[in-house]
Amino acid sequence: MKKILESKNLCKTYYSNDVEFHALKNVDLTINQGEFVAIMGQSGSGKSTLLYTLSGMDDITGGEVYIKDKKVNNLKAKEITRIRRENIGFIFQGINLVSNLTLKENVVVPGYLATKSKDIINKRAKDLLSKMEIMDQINKLPSQVSGGQKQRAAIARAMINSPDILFADEPTGALNSSSGKAVLDLIKNFNEDGQTIVMVTHDIKSASYANRVVFLKDGRIEGELDLKKYQTDNQEKVIFDFLSEKGW
Amino acid sequence: MRTILLMVRANIKSKILQSIALAAVFIAVSILFFLSVRLFGTVGAYEDMYIESKTSQCLIYVEGEDSKDIIVNYLENNEEVLNINVLSNFNNIIESNIVQGDELISIPDAMFTEYSTSEFDQIKWVEGKTVNELLDNEVIYSYGKSKLKNISVGDTIVINTEQGTREMIIAGIGIDLTYNFDTITLNRFWTTKSNVESLENGEKEYSIGISYYNYSGESEQVILDEINAVLGDKTANILTVSHELILTANSFFQMIMGSIFTLIGVILIFVGLFIIRSIVFNNIVADSKKIATLKSTGFSSKNIVSIYVLEYGVIAFLSIIIGGLVSLLLSNVVLGDLNELSNLFGSSNSVNIIQMVSVLIVMLLVIEFTVYLAARDVSKINPAVALSRGEQVNETKSTFSLIQHKRLPISLVLAIKDIFYNKKMIITLILFIVATSFTIVTLSSASYSLNTQKDNNELWLGYDIDAKVVSSTPLDLEAHDNMILELEASEYIEGTVTVYLDLNSQIFDDNQEKYLSSISEVFVTENKEPIDFSVLDGRLPDNEDEIMIAHNLLVMLKKEIGDYTTVRSLGEEKELLIVGEYQSMANQGTTFRLFLDEIDDEFLNTSLIKVNFVEGFSEEQMFAEVDNLFGSDVTLVIEYSNASMVSMIDVLGLVTGGVIGIFAVICLVVLLNLNLTNVYKERYNYGIYKSIGMDDKKIINIYLFKNSIINIIGLIIGGAIAILIVPSVMNVITGILGIVEFPTNIDYLSILVSTLIVFAVTFINALIIKRNVSLITPKELLVE
């Protein structure tokens, strides 16, 4: 399998009133193309920080991050912007749609930024929104649709430029169970089509959609679970047992 | 209460930058208010001083001992007269100039009066000698006029009289408490009795000052009519400056300055209140989510309102105190010349504590009331709604599609969409820019227009004239006519006119059924055309049975062209046909004009020959031509607009300059504040844009496009309103002076200044955003 994302000795330290807080401590992680990795851990374990630093949404204070073998930390602003635009897609827990743009407009903006052909982007947006089953809502503002519909639009936005890696930070955290399941099904579908996905979750059910689980504790990787090895209908139990063993 | 105080402290601490920005606005607005109040105070002090001083209310200048005795006897037996102040006076002066090196400063209508030794008509000493120290051949001059003409102690005044030339030294400067000589054209010099008497040759002249127990226009008119009656054929020996006339002259300054200050004040108060309201409202609205959180934890709407009232109260109180202190420092810098002017009025610049405390209380109440209204509205927010969306819900439908406008830059489309979405905030910004540009363009154009027209004699006098020609010897009718013939023969002189001003004229008011005091301007000219007499409506009189009336007087009389009116002028009563109306600032547009074929000998010596030279003829050439025609027997005196108007325009220039300067700074601070609030609000969106791969340049371009559109809309609306309104405002203001059709010039530089101010703010904010966006990661921008 081809390596698509790698971190070496990744560190992230926060400073507040001369007090240091080490959110990530020498994290080494490799993710291969087509993988669906769930990053799990308790609150404050550093899982969201890991996702933000891996995706270039946040700076790191030590170590290295590679996307497609290209070192992405310490890049110039212009280059990191290009990576955010072309190589990654990001789904936020808080959804983060631009409030004054319609769902469709929110989806096409990254596409317009990346390509000169707006017609191609409009067609891809239509296909994605159709796949998300929100075609009847696309001309509405985010404040006029439900949380599940907003998150589907956010997924379409993240996928508009066919990114190499789709990052998702608790994508179902703000949704009810049925909306959450639908969103996870959509993400899984993308993975089945070959999309690499890195998702942060604290929900075992959500993690069961992944094919690898990385467990983070106090800013360090405590263990990894390759779900592909377990051909069972009860993936959740496997994950639960793994987490229990690691001190969840 | 303790919880509320804790919340107030936390609020101020957490929003330290916003609190400082808000405090800066409060400070700036309070400086403006404090300075405005001091400005008004100056005019008020002026009024108190001249209206309430122990001065003669009416002045009668009389020639001859007999005439003086008749008037004094009559007045001594009149129960309405409180005091009579008889002083020796001399005004039979052909020409007078003040000499400063090679420079000659013309002093028109000069007179020399014995200084008063009674408690009435005292001179307030300013510099040089006091009256008691005066030697013969020394005089004291008016402080105001000395400032206007740049005359100082030690200068020499040279006068030409029938006896020859005399030189006197200006030994002192003082404020003439009889009445404000800066508002009239007369120039009175105070000197010793023996000095006045030494100037006389023949009949003695006196100034008789009259003070009334209870002044009324009617009772004064009765007294003056009776004086005319008892004088009989000696009436021609007197010149009366009635209290009514003095009051008009005194109120002249107050009226014009009052209207302009009121205009400035009204604009500033509205703009100031608008500024405070907008900022406070936007700041509180931006706190919607926090308010909702507090409500969800049990805070009542009343508690929330209390938090904001206290928070803004603390900031406002401290800011106003700082603003007050800064205004004290600034008043000597910004209003330095104005303070000098207030000294000119004799008022002191000492700080009025009551005035300052009153301003503080009023401002505090206004701010608190604004805060109360804004907080009350926002505190009613539904916690669930605010918390789920993080901001006030905006259900506005999308009106400008990003998809449809494929060819426009994405930043421009996003900027336009934002404008449609954040209508309230955008309207606030546009209104503020409208107010900014309107105020700056209006005040600058008013000042610029007046300055442009300062020397326009045709406008202010109501006829075009360059200079007057003064003979060193009295002229009989033949010599007078010969002089005119010689002048008109010159190829450099377009026209001549003989002018006599009858200050004792009256015109009958049919509505009140009584005569009103007025001034008649009597003209004798062969050819009226080169003099360009003002004609607002109708035509110039063709014969001695016709009259022209100034616009304001015509309105006052409720007469129209074609009506008949009765006037008393040049000692006669006549019924004349009104054939036209004109505008002139003489007597605030309440004069009338008669055109005669010739002037009686009786009035010849006090008449003036005025000339109009050909276009482009310089002053040096004018002097050379008159010298060429008459030699040293005749002097040319260049006609300048009257001192009071020049004084007012200069003061107005200072005031508007100061006000615009302060206002510009306030606009900068306020716009920065409004924009910063907007930037904080936008920060979250910038985070989203950055996370999806929008580069910093495009993000900043969204802001630049949005604010440029707002700026342009605001500037166009504000500028257009100002351009449309300024002429009408100017006509109203100058209409008080008698100029109802004022040629207003728009100060286009002020439009540039307004544009620079608003765009400077935009670019400063763009730099702030650049800093915010470039140095911060999307994660940090997305964190609230």
Image (cartoon, grey):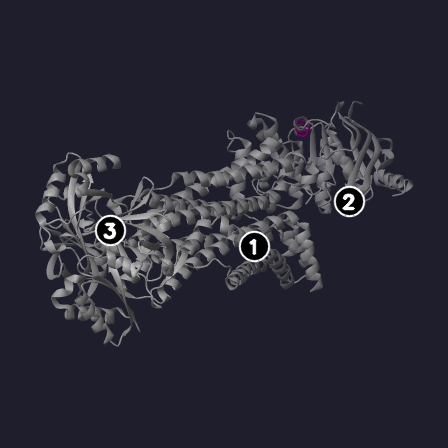
Which chain is indicated by disc 2? A
On the image, numbered disc 2 is attached to which residue?
A17
Q: Are marks 1 and 3 in contact (CB under 8 Å)?
A: no
What residue is rendered at 19% in x and 37% in y?
A: B627
On the image, numbered disc 3 is attached to which residue?
B584
- Earlier residue among tags 1 and 3: 1
The reply, left or right, for residue B444 in relation to residue A93 is left
Does any portion of residue B298 appear in the rendered image? no
Q: Nearer the viewer, residue B114 or B562?
A: B114
For label 2, the SS is loop
**Is residue B47 part of the magenta span, yes or no?**
no
Label 2 sits on what residue type? Asn
Which x, y percent locates residue B168? 30, 51
Q: Quadrant of the N terminus of chain B?
A: bottom right
Give the distance between the C-alpha atoms of the residues marked 1 and 3, in whole angstroms.
Answer: 44 Å
Which x, y percent locates residue B605? 15, 52
Q: Nearer the viewer, residue B556 or B129?
A: B129
For label 3, the SS is loop
Q: Residues within 10 Å of mark 3 (few under 14, many from 20)?
A: many
Total marks in image: 3
Quarter of the figure with residue B483: top left
Give the distance between the C-alpha atoms of the residues marked 1 and 2, in whole angstroms.
Answer: 36 Å
* Residue range of the region highlighted in magenta in the rendering: A80-84
**Is residue A83 part of the magenta span, yes or no?**
yes
On the image, numbered disc 1 is attached to which residue?
B325
